[in-house]
Amino acid sequence: MNDLDAEDRLHFEQLVLPHIDAAFNLARWLLRRREDSEEVAQEALLRACRFFRGFRGEDVRAWLLQIVRNTCYSWLEKNRPRELMVEFDEERHLQPVATPESIAITNNDRERLTRALEALPSRFREVIVLRELEGCSYREIATIMSIPIGTVMSSLSRARRQLYFALADPSCKEAVREV
Amino acid sequence: MRCDFADSLLQGYFDCELSAASADEFERHLEDCVACASELVELDILSARLKVAPLYEVAPPSLKKRIRTSLRPVTRTTAIPRQLLWHLLAAAALVVLVIVGWRLRLAFHTDDYRAELATEMVDAHVRSLRPGHLTEIHSSDGQAVNEWFKEKLSFAFPARDFGKDGFALRGGRVDFVDNRSVAVLVYAHIGYPINVFIWPTRERGTSSHAGSLQSYQWIDWRKGKLEFCAISEASAADLQQLRRLFIE
């Protein structure tokens, strides 16, 4: 913290702090637990503050989210390594999120969406969160995830498809396919 | 069957990320491709559901507060958190209990006053860190700083540069603390600005007090008829050293 002088700190407050919500939201969906997200989002913000002198770009939000993302993955590696191992095999588990039982238990769409999104492999979850919730452009997503724009598109495509079918009511799945 | 365009142009078209030419190309394709047309509808349904839910989770206020606090409140001018003030007061009260007899009331008053004063000093210190607020006269020449103060204050003190001991005089300003004008000498020590507040006092006793508040260190002492209070992010030991230089 001591690396910044008063002027830089003020600058940091004005530029970066308005994006605390974005930082927290991304961490929350990457880590899937609110308590952990608070800790990691805070750590990411402190890291951002340390690196702030090096920031020369224009897109502060993308820069911050990139740090948040890296911090989340380091944290997962350290605290929940098994989770990351499982996700290498992305196609393996297309868990049926919306089973008839779960629909009976909760009719709440938000609940269903939350569980469907959380069941996605993290890379797919990320693109959905960045695009659909955060409203990032492809270029921003490419920066944040350090992938080419073409990969952004194909990841989005697969993520959306998985999510759409996980959410579709089993009884009308076929009907939707036939539209 | 999914169309070959589904993984690329379709997504870009849906997200308005295609160039005009590519968008035209895809629209021509769309006239004949039922698969893409129906997938566009699916994307739209999904996107609407995600937005309506709503799934965006904003940071809890406690987190925002913690982050702002850990960055040190540069723009904050309000008093310290009430809870911290109570801790300070409780600590002051404990000290008081040890002292017996007639001094008890007087001591309580003094410690209470000190806690309040420290708060005001820290606020003044934080205010001074805003760009351009640190010094009104910018000079490392003690004589020049003295001359500058002479016209503005009803009391005098020697301003000295301790550059060779690691405390370089940067200048001074007149500040307003505890409802009165006080002189402030500004020093720099390994990159940290140090504010030394100086004002006349009628209280006797030369004991020195020190403490920390919001990660700032403060130390207060008296010499002659003046009271001094130094505040900084530098360590308590550094401030002690500066006090010794002042007293010498």
Image (cartoon, grey):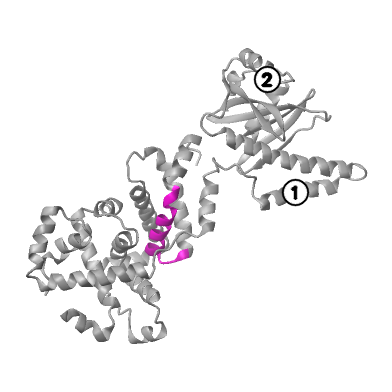
Q: Position of residue B239 (x, y in %)?
A: 65, 31
- A135 lies left or right of B149: left
Chain ID, mark 1: B
- B198 lies left or right of A92: right
Q: Is residue A96 visible?
A: yes
The residue drawn where x is 54% and y is 53% is: B65
Label 1, residues with CA under 10 Å away: few <14, some 14-19, many ≥20 = some
Tell me whether the residue at label 2 lies in contact with that at label 1, contact meaning CB atoms closer than 8 angstroms: no
Q: CA distance from mark 2 to mark 1?
A: 35 Å
Callout 1, which amino acid? Leu
Q: Work out whether disc 2 and disc 1 sit on a shared chain.
A: yes
The span shown in magenta is A17-34
Q: Nearer the viewer, residue B1 or A53?
A: B1
The residue drawn where x is 90% and y is 45% is: B100
The residue drawn where x is 41% and y is 51% is: A19
Q: Nearer the viewer, residue B140 or A84?
A: B140
Residue at mark 1: B89
Q: Which mark is residue A134?
A: none
Residue at mark 2: B152
Give the vertical position of A155 relative to B226 (above or below). Answer: below
Label 2, residues with CA under 10 Å away: few <14, some 14-19, many ≥20 = few
* Mark sitting earlier along the chain (2/1): 1
Disc 1, SS = helix
Task: Assess whether residue A51 is covered by the magenta stretch.
Answer: no
Residue A149: which quarter of the image? bottom left
Residue B235: which quarter of the image? top right
Q: Is residue B211 visible?
A: no
Callout 2, which amino acid? Lys
